[in-house]
Image (cartoon, grey):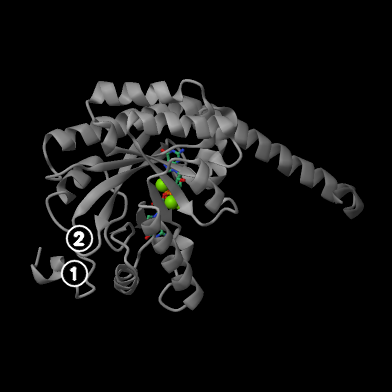
Amino acid sequence: AAKDRGKGHYVCYTADMGQRIQDAADLATQLAAAVDNAELSVVYQPIVRLGTGRLLGTEALVRWRHPRRGLISPADFIPLAEETGLIVPIGRWVLGEACRRAAEWWRDQLAGHDLVMAVNVAGRQLREPGFVADVAAALAESGLPARCLSIEVTETAVFDDERAIAALHALRDLGVMLALDDFGTASSSLGLLLTCPVTTLKLDRSFVESITTVARQEAVAMAVIQMANALALNAVAEGVETVEQAALLRGLGYRYAQGYLFSPPVPADEAAKLWAGRQPCGCGRCDADSSGG
Ligand code: C2E
Ligand code: MG
Ligand code: MG
Ligand code: MG
């Protein structure tokens, strides 16, 4: 224990801890103001069809530009937002932004077909009594058809939580799509497929990372696409960074993918331009490569 290491160390340790607690408290205060101060923004990462390189839709990802610290990753502030409950107003704002943007693209027929706007939702948001009403309101206010919205939740956010699962059923009744994000990383994956009305599995990028060299990763990716097919679910491979990964996933039967190979998350005006083109993966077998889009 710190006490055994001598007095000096003990004092140093607590001071450090105190500083960390103060930092977290400061950050929470600043995060509370971030929505009002327009420090939050939403970027959009394309979800593409393997084979044509055409966009199926985009995933909305929140960004926080802190006035002094610069860009703070959601991995660093979403947990804080969950602890403090700030995720509720933040999430409501992201949802509104994403729906407005998607409705614009949908009305402009940018996709030439129905598009998907994926929005991440934390467990804390799902359990909030007003959440389903918030989603219905965001759809009504934007005019986005419910089938064009995909709510992404992680397995841990809904595992063993009746309120969260009830919310998923209510969302599905509204007609929105439901994706299990980072699929395969929690211990509860399979049971959830029986209790939750999901429409989409997002294969976690940890299974894609070394898929071309690690046979077990390929085997898991194959098992997931076979299961998705058997259950009539959509499957999206996450974190695709190389043409080899894209080609292999396509060979396994994946139709949709997301990753830096196609595009990083980009601001809305840039994303709007991506609809017009294609994001060929360069695998040499894509229609997009041969037709030179
Ligand atoms: P996620 O929903 O699994 O989103 C995918 C993350 O992977 C994003 O990180 C994205 O930028 C990153 N990514 C995309 N392609 C690649 C790739 O090819 N390679 C690698 N290494 N990474 C890739 P980001 O934007 O930092 O978001 C991290 C997580 O924060 C998200 O993971 C999601 O769980 C959470 N998050 C982001 N925005 C929101 C939000 O509005 N609400 C909530 N509740 N959570 C959010
Ligand atoms: Mg996601
Ligand atoms: Mg994910
Ligand atoms: Mg993830």
Q: Nearer the viewer, residue 197 or 177?
A: 197
Is 12 on the left-hand or right-hand side of 238? right
Within-10-Å neighbours for mark 1: few <14, some 14–19, many 20+: many
Q: Is residue 167 visible?
A: yes
Q: Which residue is mark 2?
A: 53
Tell me what residue is drawn at x 42 percent, y 35 percent.
Answer: 67
Three-letter amino acid code of the residue under disc 2: Gly
Provide residue 270's location: percent of width, then percent of height.
Answer: 20, 46
278 and 4: which is toward the camera:
278
Residue 102 lies, in percent from the top left, at 23, 36
Residue 121 higher or lower than 287, as above or below: above
The span from disc 2 to disc 1 (Cα, nearest Å) is 7 Å
Using the rendered view, name the quadrant where residue 11 is placed.
Answer: top right
Write down the residue under mark 1. Answer: 286
As displayed, is residue 185 above or below residue 113? below
- Which label number is shown at residue 138? none
Residue name at image x 22 percent, y 26 percent: 143
SS under mark 2: loop
Secondary structure beneath disc 1? loop
Between 196 and 39, the one nearer to me in the picture:
196
The spot of residue 166 in percent (x, y) is 50, 30
